[in-house]
Image (spheres, helix red, strand yellow):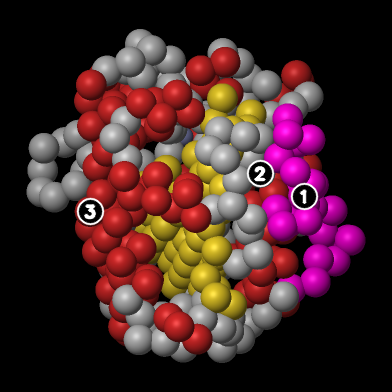
Amino acid sequence: MTDTVAVDDVPHGTSDKKVLILIFDGVRWDKLQEARTPNIDTLAAEGSLGRTMTYDPDEYSALTVSGPGHSTLLTGVWPDKHRVLSNVIEPNELERFPDVLTRLRNVRPDLSTFAIGDWPPLMEQIIDAPHVKILHPSNEGTGEGASSARQIIAWASATLSRHNPDVGYVYLILADVAGHRFGGASAAYIEAIEQLDREVSTLVQALRGRPTYDQEDWLILAATDHGHLDEGGHGGGEPEVRDIWTLAVGGDIRPAPVGGAGMAMVDIVPTALRHLGVEIDPSWELDGAAADELGPTPERA
Ligand SMILES: [Zn+2]
């Protein structure tokens, strides 16, 4: 585990096709719509912000906790394969079905990869070996210091501004903390989502302000792992916990109306790989499909 890594430690990448994966923990679909999120709305208008559900079949429908969710988003396989079935994370099959950053480190070591986030099991147990991995201590809700979301975004923005990563993963726990403390129906939960939207603005400005941006082709992928009950909490099969969303902007993503059927959780990884020009080996047994290969969104309902 690394608490702080200098931006200078991010290796110089090689690809003009680049991917930024942005993950918000615990942001339910209807509250994302209810909150005032002008920056996410702008991205959605340029790309595709759609609805999806956590796990099917029913055997896994109650696995709406963070461990299985982030493992699914990062490995591109459902829990029946990665076997992360709780927030204990262990035992699992992540060696066989690694996170996409580690997968890339193996098949395309020339690509510069980083991950930063503030949930320890994710950074310590699920994400294995990108070039740079930072577990930032979460101080959301503690009243101590600046929000860890803001600090993480500051680091990621500096990295995007000054260096040349090819694949970045940025994770923020902010909204999930608000959901647990105040409930999914609370004003504080909406405020947390609105803060996330402001962080998106900072990050996207840094990305689009890169001196080489005009020669690059960035794909931004964003998603959440589950929603929240009105009273707070998750981990069951309730609709407000299972009803989630995915967002894709850039690359070959076709703009689509907001709220159509979105990428499934397992589509994030193949969509990123395809954009990077990485051929998917059938032996990886990925469950999803690249988003630009999907049909018109209504067929994906
Ligand atoms: Zn979560």
Where is residue 158? Give x, y as percent.
28, 73
Crowding near the residue tagged with mark 1, few <14, some 14–19, many ≥20 C-alpha atoms within 10 Å? some
Q: Is residue 110 above or below residue 115?
A: below
Q: Secondary structure at mark 2?
A: loop
Q: Secondary structure at mark 3?
A: helix
The verdict on residue 79 being magenta is no
Where is residue 67? Give x, y as percent.
55, 38
| Distance from the alpha carbon under mark 3 to that under mark 2 | 27 Å
| Distance from the alpha carbon under mark 2 to that under mark 1 | 9 Å
Report if the beta carbon of the residue with label 2 is closer than 8 angstroms to ligand 1: no
Where is residue 236? Give x, y as percent.
56, 16
Residue visible at 63% across and 82% down? Answer: 109
Mark 2 or mark 3, which is nearer the start of the sequence?
3
Report if the CB atoms under discs 2 and 1 are less than 8 Å apart. yes
- Nearest to viewer (mark 3 / mark 2): 2
The residue pinned by badge 3 equals 150
Q: Quadrant of residue 257?
A: top right
Which sits in the foreground, 69 or 202? 202
Judge whether residue 153 can be spotted in this image.
no
Crowding near the residue tagged with mark 2, few <14, some 14–19, many ≥20 C-alpha atoms within 10 Å? many
Q: Write the start and end of the magenta stretch as one range.
A: 278-301
Residue that protrudes farthest toward the right in the picture: 282
Residue visible at 48% across and 47% down? Answer: 44
Q: Secondary structure at mark 1?
A: loop
Report if the beta carbon of the residue with label 3 is closer than 8 angstroms to ligand 1: no
- Position of residue 296 in the picture relative to residue 5 (left or right): right
Mark 1 or mark 2, which is nearer the start of the sequence?
2
The residue pinned by badge 1 equals 294
Tag 2: residue type? Met
